[in-house]
Amino acid sequence: MIYLANPNNPTGSAFGRKEFEEFLAAVPDGVLVVLDEAYIHYAISMGLRDSVEAHHQRKNLLILRTFSKVYGLAGLRIGYAIGPPGLLSAMNKLRTPFNTSGVAQAAALAALDDQEHVRRCIETNAAERKRLSEGLAKLGFRPVPSEANFVFIAVGPDAKALSDDLLQLGVIVRPLGWMGFPDAIRISVGTAEENDKCL
């Protein structure tokens, strides 16, 4: 099994459709590719949102998506998988009964009906992500180009101390030592006001 996140967490970096198709072509049919697309709605470039088309041509591709991010339903713990019927059937046999509540299912269906909200979230995130990245660059940081709703920056060996200092100022960032990046933080893209406060 090969597990990929696109866009990647915690860097926000992403690979495009062409790179993904070339990668899939090189993967043997007997190897399952799991593509985690939790942040795919925020990826506005590179033809990233077309992976579902690839699923129809590959029997070894499983795509995972969530309602936690752009739909704002993180507390309800609901998502879905797109993949070969045989694999989905096997997964269904292993899941716990009642693994999603009726409330979560109703909220997910309602969220799908509100595409205007999704559009606004995507547009706002793209504009604020660009502004936040540019502002961080002006401060001397080198943000990793992001296709997600966060920005990854290396801040030096005192990343945890910096995150603690920012917390005292009311700015919450995520230190990434626990993910193998002890010198980096991840900053979620917020509202214009929140991003101004961070900068």
Image (cartoon, rainbow, N blue to C red):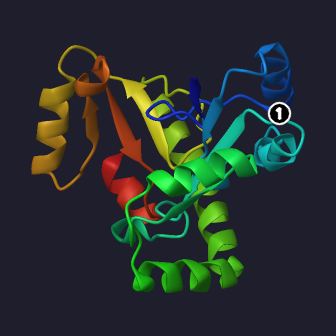
**Helix, strand or loop under label 1:** helix
Residue 45 in percent (x, y) is at 77, 43
Name the foreground residue: 184 vs 131: 184
Nearer the observer, 193 or 24: 24
Question: From this viewpoint, is residue 188 visible?
Answer: yes
Picture quadrant of residue 41: bottom right
In the picture, measured across the screen, residue 171 lies left or right of residue 43, that is left
Residue 38 in sight: no
- Is the residue 108 above or below the residue 137 in the image? below
Q: Is residue 141 above or below residue 44?
A: above
Quadrant of the image for the N terminus?
Answer: top right
Q: Mark 1 points at which residue?
A: 17
Residue 176's place in the image compared with 171, above or below, is above
Residue at the image position 48 percent from the left and 22 percent from the top: 142
> What residue do we see at 75% from left, 46% from top?
84
The percent coordinates of residue 147 (x first, y second) are 62, 41
Q: Which residue is drawn at 54% across and 35% down?
A: 12
For this view, does 26 lie left or right of residue 71? right
Mark 1 is surrounded, within 10 Å at the Cα level, by few (under 14), some (14 to 19) or many (20 or more) other residues, namely some
Relative to 163, does residue 65 appear above or below in the rendering? below
Horizontal and vertical percent position of residue 126: 63, 53
Q: Is residue 196 left or right of residue 9?
A: left
Nearer to the camera, 46 or 113: 113
Disc 1 residue type? Answer: Arg
Q: In which quarter of the image is residue 35?
A: top right
